[in-house]
Image (cartoon, helix red, strand yellow):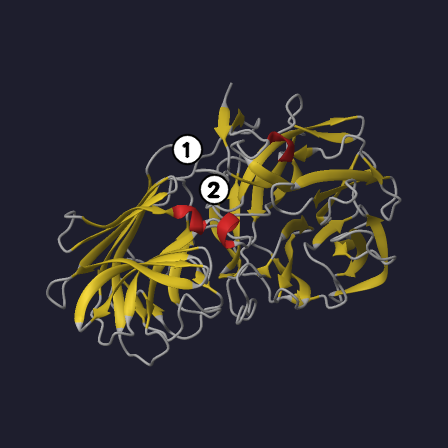
Amino acid sequence: MATFRNPIIPGFNPDPSVCRVGDDYYLVVSTFEYFPGVPIFHSKDLVHWRQIGHVLDRPSQLDLDGTPCSKGIYAATIRYHEGIFYMITTFVESVTGARRNFYVTAEDPSGPWSDPVWLPEAPGIDSSLFFDDDGKAYIMANRQPPGGQQYPKHMEIYLQELDLAQGKLVGEKYSLWDGALKFIHAQEGPHLYKVDGWYILLIAEGGTGHTHSITVARSQSLTGPYEGCKSNPILTHRHLGKRHPISNVGHGDLIETQNGDWWMVCLGSRPYGGYYRNLGRESFLVPVEWEDGWPVVNAGKGMVEIEMERPNLPQQRFSPFPACDHFDRNRLAYTWMFIRTPRGDFWSLEERPGYLRLRLKPETLMQEANPAFVGRRQEHMSFAARTALEFQPKTEQEAAGVVLLQNTEYQYRMEVALAGGSKSVRLIRRTAGTDEVLAAGPLPEPDSRIYLKVEAVGQSYSFYYATQSEEWQPLVEDADGTLLSSDVAGGFTGSVMGLYATSHGTGSSNYADFDYFEYLPLNDE
């Protein structure tokens, strides 16, 4: 039996949505406060995916200024209709601010995508699109039931026609369903399909934590009434306990292959070192069968597994991206991202060819701002990451180095800075908004190159530095990595690592040069 391993897209890649065009598959995920927004992946076999771009890659599409951590771009849906790709999503301004829905379009999924078409009359989050047999388009999202909430976070799914020519909603809003699991809360993530004459409504319930789940309802009329499946939830792992290797499974999207088989992409997490989910919510794949007009997920087992039988599709692998980015191209690889919309010319691959130059900005990683930071997702429980830095701080406010980031309040920063007039390397742990210097090491001549390395073995993170290549000295070993988990830090994102430079609120014309960044898994997960 040919098998594949979950997750299909590891690391902080939540809320997957998928569509098929011929024998090509396209998938998008959520990005919250990170820019560019909504990476898009391509596959031929549903197992091997290659990122081909970002949907929201221009500031005109995505203004994240002032967006708090774990807000911004929520669950996206991708659909294809009559030669056009559509991506619809919700921009969450803040904890209590507006939830603004919009969509963008493209003829080529790798871009360019249009500027947003805003739908101010569409409330709720996790907006989705459905095209009926007559070509009409409809939007779905969640909202508070018009009759009022019967329990905390009680929501319902509504539907309204979308006039694509005018780019606005028309007609009345229809209440479709308020879920199968009364008092579980947080009905969201709707996706609608038409299968054998039935309208099939798939939603997420139970919040995105351990009680996450997928439920389904159906109707022979688009606007209902919808009947819940007696087998609901059709997918959850909450009954498996917190020691199970895959947790908080939910938020699914169905896809039919060109062979008539059905599969589901969904999110889930892989806790390790206890119930800690540093990798965030990842994208998984699981088979679906139909019985009596209802979807059955992984028949006979009813759960997502790490190793599963591969789809009956011609396998197509992609060459892996290089483990080491030497910054020798004129644009950043798709792996990299910024915190919020990048403002100012603070980074360059051309000022010193073969290096990533970061100009120091006053903004810091401890602010809800756009610091001079370029980062990537942690994708493995155990990994090694290293870089070579050339940086001469001029004042004690200037610093540059490597960061492991969960949010503004929880992070590790291994940075080069001045202390008492002397250049040194130090490790700062930030917990609940308080910085603590765990260790510091002196550095030799002012203009020397320094090598920085982080190695993680599970929740044990070790930090090293060197002034000569491969002559590593420990700065701190076996530091606690659990603070990089949302279970400690809160929020919805996974751990991100990267390169940064700051002048801590002061003006500076200084810069830091990074020769390369290498990221390697330390074992096969």
Determine whether label 1 and label 2 are within 8 Å by CB: yes
Name the quadrant of the C terminus.
top left
Q: Position of residue 390 (x, y in %)?
A: 21, 64
Three-letter residue code for mark 1: Glu
The amino acid pointed to by label 2 is: Pro
Q: Is residue 240 left or right of residue 180?
A: left
Q: Position of residue 344 (x, y in %)?
A: 41, 75
From what the image shows, is residue 49 above or below residue 175? Answer: above
Say whether residue 359 is left or right of residue 149: left
Question: Disc 2 marks which residue?
Answer: 10
Query: Of helix, strand and loop, which one carries label 1?
Result: loop
Where does the image place residue 119, in percent across and percent down from the top left? 72, 66
Residue 333 seen by the camera: no
Q: Residue at x 59, y 40 (%)?
A: 248
Q: Which mark is residue 525?
A: 1
Give the crowd class for mark 1: few <14, some 14-19, many >=20 residues within 10 Å: few
* Quadrant in the rendering for residue 345: bottom left
Outermost residue to the left: 445
